[in-house]
Image (cartoon, helix red, strand yellow):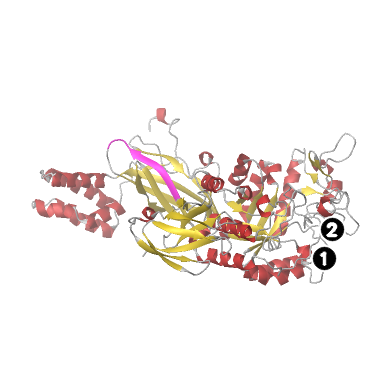
C-alpha cells in the first residue's frame, strides 16, 4: 500500500485498508460510548445487534455478525438480515458468564447482484447469453475458493452455464443449490470489517431475571424477644422458596457501632438494649469482614448460604462503604476519613439531617490506592464464603473510577458475580453506574404511579441505548421507602403494585414481610419512613396476619417462572384501551410481552384504581404477530384459571379490584 495511505487507514486486526472496500458499516447498536464500555448479556442468552450497512450504487451486499469469547482467535459467524432502509439486524448466542467480543463484516455479493440482474433480463425477455458467460466466470472463481467437495459441484455448474443450450444454462443459473454453494464460499477480497471490536459482558441468569426478598435476620428468632441468628434464618428458606423468590437479600450483617447509636424510630439516643442501625458498621468486634456476634459465626453464615443455594436461592449481601466511629478502620487508617479543624472526624450529613452514627469514606484520600485495594478485598472475602450477589448501598456517593476498576477486576476472577446499585439519584448518575459495570439498578418505579408515568418510564428504560446496559430492578417498597400510595393499607393497592413490578420488569424485589403483610403506617404524616422501622429495632412478625397477600405473591412468582415472556424487560408493547362510558381512561393499563422464540405471549391488564371496577375495550395488536385484525384466539387468565375466546383485535375487559385487580393473560393465537 502506498505510504500516503498508511496514517489515514491503519491496520484493523488482520485486515488492511483497501480502496476497493465499498461497503459502509456504521451506527452499530449496541455500541456504548464508541466501544469504551461493554454492553450486557445474560448466560445462555441471545444478543441482537443492528447496524446501518450500505454500498454505493445498487449492488447486493451480504453481512455477517461475528462473535467470540474474549481471548479466542476464532470468530463464530452468522448472517445478518436487512430490515429495510439500509438497516440490518443479526443475533448470536452466548454461553457461560464472561467477556465476549463482536464485530461486523460485509461485502458486495457479486454473484447475487448478477443473479438479480439476470432474472430481470429474463423477465424482460432479453438475450442473456453473455450474462450467462459472466456468471460462469463468477462461479469459476467461487470454485477456486471452495473446498474439494464444493469445488467439484461448482465446476459442474460452470460447465452447465457455458452450455450452448440457453434454456439449460438458464435453469442452472437459477438453481437454488448454486446459490447455496456460492453463499458458502463468498468472495471476501474487498470485504469491509467494522473498525471496532466491541465487547459484551455476559452475566449469570439472575442478573437478567430475579425475584428478591429482603429480610432482617435479627428479627427471625424462634422465640419472641430473642435476637435472630443465621441458623434461625435457615428455617425461613422453605417459606421464601415456596413463595417463588430466588434471591434473599440481607442488610449489613456486621458488628454495629455504639457511638451515637440510633434508637427506635431513628431517635438520636438509643436505649441500652436497642440494637442500632445495621448500616452503622463496625465496633471492637470487627468491621466489614466480620459478622455481628448475636447473628452467629462466619461459619454459620457460610452454612446458611449453602443451605439457601440448595433450595435454589442466592444470598445477596449488602455492601455499605461507610463506618461507625467505632470501626477499626478509623484507628488503623485515619487517612481514609475527613477530619475537621477541631480534630473530630466528619460524620455523614444531609442538612438539616445529621447521621452521627456513620462516617463517610474519603475517596480523595492521598492513600487512595490502598483504600481501593482494601475495599475490593471486602467483596473477595464474602465471595470466598459463597456470596455471588451484592446489593451496594449508595454507590453514587463513591468514586466512579473505583467502581469501574473494582467490578472489572473482580469479574476477571469471578464472572458470575452480580452487583445491584442502590442509587436513587439523578438519572445520569444511575446510567453511569450501569455503564461501568453494575448488573442491575434500583429505579424510580416506586414513585411512578399513574398510567402515563409508568408507560413513559418503562419506555425510556427499554429504548436504546439504555436497554443495552441498564437493568432496572422494580421495588414497590424498601425499609427506607413506604410510598404514600401504600399508606392507606388497602390490600388491593399492594397487589396492584406487586403485579406491576413483577410483570413490567424481569427483576423485582420487596422488603418482607412488611410487604406481604401490607404494613402501611408511616412514622409521621408526609414521611415515607415506616413507623417502628426494622432499621432501628428488632420486630416480631405474625406471618399469618389476616389480610396478607402471600398467596398472590406465590401465584405471580410461579407465573413468572412458567412464562419466558416475563423473564425479560425489553420486549414490551403497551396496548391501547378505550374506557367505557362512566370509566376513567387512565385507570386501565395493558401491555404485551413475547418470548424470544415467539411461542409465549403474555398480556397483562391492571386496574390502577384500587376502589372501583373499571372496564373498557382493549385493542390487542394482532399485527405484531402478522395476523389479521379479524383473527380469533384464546386467552387464559393465569391468575384465575379462566379461559376466554376473543374475536378480532377489539375485546371487552372488566376488572373488579376487590376480586382481583389484574389479569395476566396467556395468549394462544392458534
Quadrant housing residue 308: bottom right
Q: How many marks?
A: 2
Query: Where in the figure is residue 357, as x and y percent of width and height?
Result: 84, 48
The magenta span reads 48-57
Query: Where in the figure is residue 661, as x and y percent of width and height?
Result: 56, 60
- SS for callout 2: loop
Label 2 packing within 10 angstroms: few (<14), some (14-19), many (20+): many
* Depicted 662 relative to depicted 30: above or below: below
- SS for callout 1: loop
Furthest-top residue in this view: 4
Q: Is residue 364 left or right of 97 when viewed as pictured? A: right
* Depicted 60 relative to depicted 227: above or below: above
Furthest-left residue in this view: 164
Residue 317: assigned label: none
* Depicted 341 relative to depicted 207: above or below: above
Q: Which of the two residues, 563 or 27, is positioned nearer the viewer here?
A: 563
Residue 275: assigned label: 2
Query: Where in the figure is residue 218, as x and y percent of width and height?
Result: 79, 63
Label 1 packing within 10 angstroms: few (<14), some (14-19), many (20+): some
Q: Is residue 361 left or right of 651 when viewed as pictured? A: right
Query: Where in the figure is residue 92, as x and y percent of width and height?
Result: 44, 54
Q: Which of the two residues, 589 or 112, is positioned nearer the viewer here?
A: 589
Q: Is residue 128 left or right of 434 when viewed as pictured? A: left
Q: Quadrant of the C terminus?
A: bottom left
Residue 227: assigned label: 1
Q: Residue at x 79, y 62 (%)?
A: 539
Amino acid at each position: 500500500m502506498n505510504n500516503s495511505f498508511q496514517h489515514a487507514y491503519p491496520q484493523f486486526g488482520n485486515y488492511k485498508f483497501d480502496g476497493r472496500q465499498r461497503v459502509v458499516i456504521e451506527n452499530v447498536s449496541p455500541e456504548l460510548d464508541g466501544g469504551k464500555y461493554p454492553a450486557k448479556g445474560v448466560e445462555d442468552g441471545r444478543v441482537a445487534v443492528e447496524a446501518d450497512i450500505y454500498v454505493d450504487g445498487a449492488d447486493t451486499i451480504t453481512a455477517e455478525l461475528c462473535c467470540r469469547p474474549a481471548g479466542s482467535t476464532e470468530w463464530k459467524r452468522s448472517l445478518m438480515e436487512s430490515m429495510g432502509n439500509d438497516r440490518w439486524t443479526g443475533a448470536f448466542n452466548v454461553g457461560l458468564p464472561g467477556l465476549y467480543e463482536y464485530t461486523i463484516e460485509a461485502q458486495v455479493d457479486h454473484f447475487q447482484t448478477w443473479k438479480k440482474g439476470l432474472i430481470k433480463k429474463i423477465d424482460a425477455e432479453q438475450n442473456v447469453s453473455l450474462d450467462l458467460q459472466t456468471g460462469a466466470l463468477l462461479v469459476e472463481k467461487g470454485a477456486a475458493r471452495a473446498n474439494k467437495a464444493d469445488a467439484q459441484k461448482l465446476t459442474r455448474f460452470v460447465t452447465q452455464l457455458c452450455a450452448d443450450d440457453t434454456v439449460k444454462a438458464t435453469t442452472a443459473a437459477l438453481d437454488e443449490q448454486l446459490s447455496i454453494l456460492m453463499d458458502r464460499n463468498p468472495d471476501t477480497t474487498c470485504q469491509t470489517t467494522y473498525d471496532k471490536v466491541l465487547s459484551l459482558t455476559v452475566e449469570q441468569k439472575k442478573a437478567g431475571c430475579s425475584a428478591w426478598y429482603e429480610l432482617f435476620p435479627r428479627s427471625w428468632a424462634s422465640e419472641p424477644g430473642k435476637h435472630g441468628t443465621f441458623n434461625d434464618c435457615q428455617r425461613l428458606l422453605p417459606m421464601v422458596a415456596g413463595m417463588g423468590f430466588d434471591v434473599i437479600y440481607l442488610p449489613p450483617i456486621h458488628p454495629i457501632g455504639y457511638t451515637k447509636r440510633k434508637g427506635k424510630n431513628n431517635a438520636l439516643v438509643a436505649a441500652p438494649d436497642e440494637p442500632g442501625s445495621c448500616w452503622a458498621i463496625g465496633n471492637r468486634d470487627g468491621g466489614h469482614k466480620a459478622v455481628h456476634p448475636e447473628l452467629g459465626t462466619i461459619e454459620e453464615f457460610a452454612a446458611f448460604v449453602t443451605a439457601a443455594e440448595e433450595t435454589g436461592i442466592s444470598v445477596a449481601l449488602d455492601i455499605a462503604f461507610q463506618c461507625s466511629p467505632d470501626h477499626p478502620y478509623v484507628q488503623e487508617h485515619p487517612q481514609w476519613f475527613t477530619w475537621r479543624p477541631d480534630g473530630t472526624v466528619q460524620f455523614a450529613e444531609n442538612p438539616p439531617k445529621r447521621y452521627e452514627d456513620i462516617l463517610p469514606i474519603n475517596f480523595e484520600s492521598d492513600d487512595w490506592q490502598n483504600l481501593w485495594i482494601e475495599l475490593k478485598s471486602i467483596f473477595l472475602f464474602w465471595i470466598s464464603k459463597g456470596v455471588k450477589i451484592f446489593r451496594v448501598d449508595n454507590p453514587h456517593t463513591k468514586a466512579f473510577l473505583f467502581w469501574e476498576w473494582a467490578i472489572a477486576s473482580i469479574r476477571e476472577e469471578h464472572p458470575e458475580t452480580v452487583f445491584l446499585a442502590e442509587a436513587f439519584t439523578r438519572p445520569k448518575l444511575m446510567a453511569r453506574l450501569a455503564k461501568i459495570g453494575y448488573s442491575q439498578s434500583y429505579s424510580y418505579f416506586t414513585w411512578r404511579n399513574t398510567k402515563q408515568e409508568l408507560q413513559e418510564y418503562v419506555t425510556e428504560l427499554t429504548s436504546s441505548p439504555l436497554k443495552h446496559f441498564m437493568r432496572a430492578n422494580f421495588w414497590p417498597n424498601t425499609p427506607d421507602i413506604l410510598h404514600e400510595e401504600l399508606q392507606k393499607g388497602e390490600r388491593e393497592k399492594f397487589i396492584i403494585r406487586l403485579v406491576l413490578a413483577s410483570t413490567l420488569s424481569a427483576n423485582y424485589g420487596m422488603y418482607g414481610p412488611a410487604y406481604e403483610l401490607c404494613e402501611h403506617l408511616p412514622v409521621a404524616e408526609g414521611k415515607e419512613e415506616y413507623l417502628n422501622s426494622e432499621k432501628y429495632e428488632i420486630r416480631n412478625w405474625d406471618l399469618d396476619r389476616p389480610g396478607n397477600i402471600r398467596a398472590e405473591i406465590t401465584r405471580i412468582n410461579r407465573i413468572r417462572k412458567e412464562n419466558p415472556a416475563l423473564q425479560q424487560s425489553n420486549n414490551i408493547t403497551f396496548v391501547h384501551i378505550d374506557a367505557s362510558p362512566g370509566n376513567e381512561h387512565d385507570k386501565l393499563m395493558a401491555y404485551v410481552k413475547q418470548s424470544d422464540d415467539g411461542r409465549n405471549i403474555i398480556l397483562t391488564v391492571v386496574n390502577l384504581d384500587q376502589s372501583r371496577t373499571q372496564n373498557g375495550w382493549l385493542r390487542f395488536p394482532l399485527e405484531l404477530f402478522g395476523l389479521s385484525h379479524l383473527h380469533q384466539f384464546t386467552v387464559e387468565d393465569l391468575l384465575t384459571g379462566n379461559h376466554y375466546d376473543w374475536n378480532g383485535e377489539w375485546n371487552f375487559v372488566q376488572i373488579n379490584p376487590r376480586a382481583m385487580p389484574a389479569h395476566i393473560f396467556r395468549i394462544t393465537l392458534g
